Image (cartoon, grey):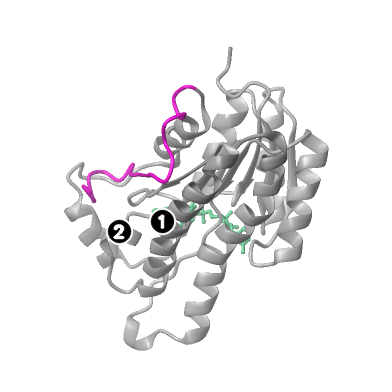
Amino acid sequence: MTQLHGKTAVITGAGSGIGAAIARLYASEGANLFLLDVDKAQVDAVAVECSSTGVTAVARRVDVMESDDVRAAMDAAAELLGGIDILVSSAGILDETPFLELSPEVYDRTMNVDLRGVFLAARWAAPHMVKRGGGRIINISSQLGIKGGTGLAHYVAAKAGVIGLTKALALELAPHSILVNAIAPGPIFTPLIEGLSDEWKAAKQAELPVGRFGTPEEVAPTALLLASSPGGNLYTGQTLGPNSGDVMP
Ligand SMILES: NC(=O)c1ccc[n+]([C@@H]2O[C@H](COP(=O)([O-])OP(=O)(O)OC[C@H]3O[C@@H](n4cnc5c(N)ncnc54)[C@H](O)[C@@H]3O)[C@@H](O)[C@H]2O)c1
């Protein structure tokens, strides 16, 4: 029996990188999927790939900054799939800007996607989980939200916020049998970090005890653990760190 057989999952940022790898792994474990991304062509392609394993996989263009869109997507997912068991918030953006050059606009945009987007997805998915008698919320943070990083104050602030939000929701939603956890990956080879400077990447790699960046396929199994039962049953309010040893809390 596959680990997520009969479960339904909504994944934001499912068109690329870590979100896409989680979608593929969840599909291979039998979950029916509602995949959201601002890039419709990319998320369509991931949905086609996932469907080929025999599960239902629907793609929808959603900007996680837009409350009405996120709410409509969660309602549509619950209706089409019969409910929402699992939410993974992976949509995110990052750009490297020294703090002394950081504009309020770039700060706000990063907070809106990387933190408000996580809030909105949980806010509009959780009522469906309450109706179903339980669920799992998995928020993708970053190890930078724990240890900080130069040129990334806006991103670090958002990712630290995701960890705080995760703890608060874990406490408040526990009576509804909803378990809420975060994953704080180390540097992972995806389009997200392609734009960072070579100096930043070289310095980062030198800091890692494991000595290399990871791949999305090395992060996705942590999201499977948190979604699964019995494996994930005792985790809530936690931040798991597939991070090449970058942070050792
Ligand atoms: N790659 C890393 O090194 C790394 C490390 C730690 C944490 N993370 C986090 O992992 C998550 C996934 O990142 P990734 O590395 O897979 O990047 P990625 O760029 O490959 O994927 C991010 C996806 O989010 C989508 N997206 C961006 N803005 C959106 C919006 N407003 N609404 C909906 N979708 C939107 C993009 O279209 C893209 O498909 C992010 O939250 C990121 O911060 C990444």
Is 83 on the left or on the right of 236, as rendered?
right
Q: Answer yes or no: do the residues labelled 2 and 1 have beta carbons within 8 Å? A: yes
Q: Earlier in the sequence, mark 2 or mark 1?
A: 2
Instruction: Give residue 231's position: percent from left, percent from top.
Output: 44, 24
Which residue is found at the position 33% from the left and 82% from the top? 99
SS at circle 2:
helix
From the viewer's side, name the closer residue of 204 and 11: 11
Residue position for label 2: 146
In the rendered image, the vertical position of residue 242 relative to residue 230, given as above or below: below
Judged left or right of residue 116, residue 42 is right
Determine the secondary structure under disc 1: helix
For the point 44% across and 40% down, which residue is it? 236
Residue drawn at (72%, 54%) of the image: 40
| Chain part drawn in magenta | 230-249
Whether residue 78 is situated above or below residue 160 in the rendered picture: above
* Quadrant in which the N terminus appears: top right
Taking the magenta stretch, the answer to whether it contains residue 112 is no
Q: Is residue 19 left or right of residue 33?
A: left
Question: Any magenta on residue 246?
Answer: yes
Task: Quote the CA–CA distance across marks 2 and 1.
Answer: 9 Å
Callout 2 crowding tier (Cα within 10 Å): few <14, some 14–19, many ≥20? some
Q: Report crowding for label 1: few under 14, some 14 to 19, many 20 or more residues within 10 A (C-alpha).
A: many
Callout 2 amino acid: Ile
Q: Quadrant of residue 80?
A: top right
- Viewer-nearest of discs 2 and 1: 1
Seen from the viewer's position, the closer of residues 200 and 103 is 103
| In the image, residue 112 above or below residue 62 | below
Q: Position of residue 15 (x, y in %)?
A: 61, 49
Which residue bears the numbered disc 1? Answer: 163
Q: Position of residue 96 (x, y in %)?
A: 38, 72
Q: How many marks?
A: 2
